[in-house]
Structures are given as structure tokens and as C-alpha cells.
Amino acid sequence: MSFPWAKQYEPKHPLMKWVDDRLPLPRFVYNAVGAGYPVPRNLNYFWNFGVLAGMFLAVQIVTGIVLAMHYAANAGIAFDSVEHIMRDVNAGWFLRYAHANGASMFLLVVYIHIARGLWYGSYKAPREMVWLLGVVIFLLMMATAFMGYVLPWGQMSFWGAQVITGFFSAIPGVGETIRVWLLGGFAPDNAALNRFFSLHYLLPFVIAGVVILHIWALHIPGSSNPTGVEVKSEQDTVPFHPYYTAKDGVGVGVALIVFAALIFFAPNLLGHPDNYIPANPLSTPAHIVPEWYFLPFYAILKSFTFDFLWIPAKLWGVLAMFASILLLFFLPWLDTSPVRSANYRPTYRIFLWVLLVDVIVLGYIGGASPTPSVILIGQLASTYYFAHFLLILPIVSMMERPRPLPNSITEAVLAGKGGTSPAQTALAAE
Amino acid sequence: MATLDEAVPPGEAHDAPADPRRRDYLSIGAVAFAGVGAGVVALPLINQMSPSADVLAQSTTELDVSAIQPGQSIKSTFRKQPLFVRNLTPKEIAEADAVPVSDLRDPETLAQRTKEGKANWLITLGVCTHLGCVPLGAGEGENKGPFGGYFCPCHGSAYDTAGRIRSGPAPSNLAVPDYEFISDTVVRVG
């Protein structure tokens, strides 16, 4: 499972040796995130984001557990209990703002983590399973974030729950029955709020479990790297600890500065003021929008305004929105280029930048009012999103002539430090 | 194992065990029995999510509509969902009747959506059939949309004076719940 030159765990203290013989948990940690895990020596700061995602998952679980000690999942008093947290509970405002902005930070670092994977081809063989589990984590995060947003039971909470459970009513025939079953009523109410709270508490631990599988699957081939060239020898790697614990520490510090800036200086910047109005089942806010991290998908949903091929617009929108995420499951097989890193793919990298701009445009459209020009731009941007994965990616993979890859990670690293020939590199290894 | 094999009754072949063996029958039977049990236990776990008795008990609403003037509408609730009761003007009825039914996305006439002799009383759920927002148009001064009925601000679905979908992403007309006039002025919905 690891490289032959990986350091072995050697407990020094007799107690640790006693533990290791009976339950090799310290050995497991040592091999996973300690000196026993050899990592390519050339990782850049984009490789921080996996650890950052793990940190924000921990932040969310810790703040969430303490918030649950004060929150009341009852439609009659949920809103008031959140205000009670904000006003009366000691440091309650801090915990709630940390949890609300922690969700944004978690999604933000995960989006960068996904973009890193797209740029450096981290989803390609032999790391397909790492990618697939990552998409599962992303789906679980979306479900968790949605249900968490419902809990304060403000106007956006309520109408978000109404709209998102409304997706299921698009299913032909049984849709309305499924929607009523999911809600436990005909509209979001106490039953829905309670079950969302229960699941919102459960799913983070499911995410943590899948994260363990994600890391397990990663550690079988080992981490990828910016060149996309596989590790060939010991000189290509350094131990995870202390080299990458230190480098990740820098990223953790920067991420916490951003997080603190949000909590202390702009805690409601990413929220919506309407969610400070208690839920009113008889009045929809004039402009309902999801949280920022769902806006691109919401834009795809909104882009279908007409029936097409006997399928109603509503079903198209819901199908397209789910398809835009499920598409990611097929990415390892849609990109057939043998070269992983976009650094060596002159054509693919251009389209990847276009995709990034496209997703940002979709994000803007998702939050904009549905005027005719906004709808048209949304339709074009949605089409491009699917075209990128289903047309451009396979065609570019076929036609593109990649730039020459370095012979090894070490050669690439040394080339960047003034250059050396492969022969000298080999000599340096002696 | 050896002792068990020797326990095979006399008369059965020792050296040629039947395929499937008796033990396979026991294994399959036991696992199948446990599987059925697990399936049965799953039923209450799934069904607990359906609306509970107290939610279903809110299933009828009685409304006095005597104070609603022609052209006015009120918002009430039915099963915790908004309910629109609208007293149509003769002009609105004429507009609704003038539309060729075959042109509609969800073809229904106004007469099919109201009670006989009470064509001016349009009673619908105030739940947009797209994703469930409350359309505008029932309140005083709200935007009634391009067809003079209701307009959903969420994704721009527009309904006509019979509550029928005319443009936008919604797939069907505003739902008409079961209701009856129990007197000239009182409606029981549900």
C-alpha cells in the first residue's frame, strides 16, 4: 500500500510498544499522516485544500454539536431558539457565526480542491476511486448544508425547503407522494424540521466515514503531484511529517485568517437578510435564492423554461441540475488523455479556464432575477457546462498533442532550480 | 466436522454429498427468513416519515366567502398550504372562457375548475406547481402577471384568471382541492 522506502513505525516507549502490539492505532496514524507516508516532493499550495476541508469538517462538527445543545427543532420555537443562541447563550453569536461561515469555508475549500483535481488530472487512473468517493462526499455535503440552512426556520429556510423538496415532485407519477413522504406533511412544517435536524446531525459523521475511505483510496497509489508523473524512486518523495504537516500548517493559518475575518467583520456577508424574518407559509420572499455555493446548480435548474421532447420543463430542470453533478462520476472515463496535469496540456488548460469562467457566470445567473436576457445567458452557460464534459473533453483528449513530460518528479524540480540533465539527476541520487 | 459427517443417517451416501447439501438449505432458509424479517422491520421505518395522524387531521377547512366582493380574493390555508379563494368578475370569466382549451399546457376549462352555478368562485391552492412558491395576485395590489391571474415571482410562471398555467416553467394548473358549498356562503375544503 505504500512505497517500499516508507519509514516504519518504531515505538520507543514500552507503553507505546505494548499498545502497538494490541491495537496498532498509532501505527495507523503514523502511516496515514505521519512520517510513514511518502509524498511527492513537489506539491504546491493547492495540495493544502484536502487538509483544509478536513479541518473545516472538524470545525462544523464541533460547533454543530455545541449549537445543538441550545437549539430547539420545533417549528414553533426554532427561530426564537436561534435568536436565543445569538443573544443569550454565552458566546452563542460566535458559535453560530462560526458554524454558518464554516459551511461557506468548507464548500469554498472543497470547490478549490475539486478545481485542483480538474487541473492536475487527479481523477485519472489509478485514482478514480478517490475521485468517485470525493463526489459522494460533495453530494453528502450539499444535502447536509441544505438541511442545516433550513434549521433557523426563517423565510429563506422555509422556502428553500419548499423549493428543494419540490424537486422531487417533478418525478412523473409518484413525485408528489414522495414529496409528501419526505416532508411528513403537505408543506414544510414541524415534521420536516425535525427530520432535517436529525439528518443534519447524522450526515457529517457519514461524511467523516467517507472521508476515511477517500484517504484510504488515496494512500494506495499515493498522492498525485503537479507534474502528474508517477513517483519513481525515493528521491521523488519526502515524508508527510514534518514536510507537509508544516506546509499544510501555513495553509491552515491563512484559511483561519479568512475564516476569522468573515466571522468577526462580515458574519452575514454570505447570508441572506430574509432569513432573519420568521418562516411564513403564506408569503414567498420576492426573490428566493439558495446559498452562494448552490447558485451555479440553481442556474442550471432555472434554465429550462419550456417543455422539450414531451418532457415538462420542470422535470428537465431538475434532471439537468442533478445530472450536472452526477456527470462528475463519469469524468475519469470522459477524459481519455494519458497526461494528467494541465501544465502539459496546452489545449485542455484553455478550456478548463473557460469552464471556470462558465461556472462563475452560472453562479451569477443563479442569483439574478429571471429576466429574459438572464435566462438566455443561463441557457448558454448551462449548455456550455455540459458541452465541456460531454463534447470538448473527449475531443480535446483525442486531438491534443501534449508537451513533453519530465522523466521524473526530481528532474522537474531540479529543472526549476537552474536545470540539470537526467544523467546528473541520476548521479545525484547515488 | 468429522463427527457431524458421521451423524448422517444410515442409508445416505457418505462419499457423494447431495448438491445442494442439507446445510445449504438451512443456510439459505435462515438467511431468507432473516431477510424477510429485515424487510418487514423496514416498513415502519419508512412509513414513519409519511404525514402523521395530527397532520392528516387538519385536512378540512371551512370558509365563509360572503364578504369577498367580485374581483377580490383571499388567502386562507388548507393542510398548512396557502389556499386562494377568488370571486371572479364577469370580465375575468369571459377572458378565461375565451381561451381555446387546445392551446393550453394543461387543458381545462373554467367550468371544469369551478362548481356548477358557481363559476365565479375560483378556489385553488396557492402553491405554484413548479417548485411550490406562493404566487402573487391574491393580495390587494399584487402583480397578477401578464394573464391577469397569478404570477409566481420565484421562476416567473404566469397563471390566467382560471388559475391555469400559461407561461413559465410550471407544468400544470394551480391545483383545485376537493371542496363543496355547504351553503350559499360557506365552503368546506377537503
Image: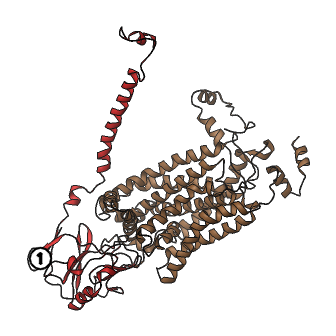
Chain colours: A brown, B red
Q: Residue at the location (52% across, 53% down)?
A: A136
Tell me which corner region of the image, top left, top right, bottom left or bottom right, holds residue A33: top right
- List x then y, in percent, for residue A109: 59, 60
Asked whether A422 or A149 is in front, the reply is A422
Residue A253 in sight in this render: no
Q: Residues within 10 Å of mark 1 (few under 14, many from 20)?
A: some
At 77% from the left and 61% from the top, the residue drawn is: A401
**Closer-to-camera residue (A269/A330):** A330
Q: Chain of mark 1?
A: B
Quadrant location, the C terminus of chain A: top right
Residue where numbered disc 1 is placed? B186
Q: Amino acid at mark 1?
A: Val
**Residue A208 drawn at (x, y percent):** 52, 48
Q: Residue furthest top?
A: B10
Viewport quadrant of the N terminus of chain A: top right
Query: Which residue ends up furthest to the left in the rendered image?
Result: B183
Residue pictured at 63% horizontal, 28% vertical? A17
Compared to residue A312, the image places residue B88 above or below, namely below
Q: Is residue A286 left or right of residue B181?
A: right
Image x and y of residue A254, in percent: 65, 61
**Residue B13 appears in view:** yes
Q: Position of residue A150 (x, y in %)?
A: 40, 63
Quadrant of the rendered structure where residue B14 is? top left
Quick check: A308 above or below A204?
A: below
Image mark count: 1
In this picture, residue B101 sits left or right of residue A122: left
**SS for dot 1:** strand
